[in-house]
Image (spheres, rainbow, N blue to C red):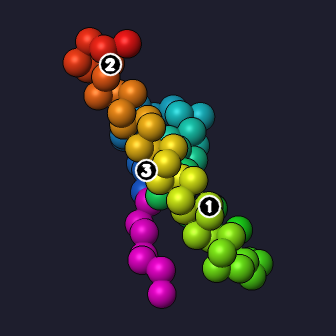
Amino acid sequence: MAKSVNVSVSLDDVGGNPNRLIRRFIKKCKKERIVEECVERSRHEKRSVKRRRAKERARRNAKKAESLRNKKNGII
């Protein structure tokens, strides 16, 4: 079963601006991968495809982390 996620944003957090409220809510939903999980669960996907996608995501994250480390250490 999936973990339960409580995403909440109040008008006080965004200074009373409803447009910023909506943007912040969407940003939090993307960060928690709520929509992506719904799409994944809506259709069956082979395990090999899931593993391939997870491996690609891990490779991308590792490359991004290495780039940030190099940037922080002054290596370009």
| Residue at the spot of label 1 | 53
Closer to us: 75 or 36: 75
In the displayed structure, 19 sits above or below 5; it is: above
Q: Residue furthest bottom?
A: 1
Q: Quadrant of residue 62?
A: top left
> Residue 46, how many percent across, how many down?
71, 79
Closer to us: 71 or 20: 71
- Is most of the magenta stretch helix, strand or loop? loop
| Whole-number angstrom distance, CA of label 2 to CA of label 1 | 27 Å
Q: Nearer the viewer, mark 2 or mark 3?
A: 2
| Residue at the spot of label 3 | 9
67 on left or right of 34: left
In the displayed structure, 59 sits above or below 47; it is: above
Per the rendered image, the range of residues in magenta is 1-7
In the displayed structure, 23 sits above or below 49; it is: above
Closer to us: 24 or 12: 24
Residue 47 is inside the magenta segment: no
Q: Nearer the viewer, mark 3 or mark 1?
A: 1
- Kind of residue indicated by mark 1: Arg
Identify the disc placed on residue 71: 2
> Residue 7, how many percent across, how many down?
44, 60
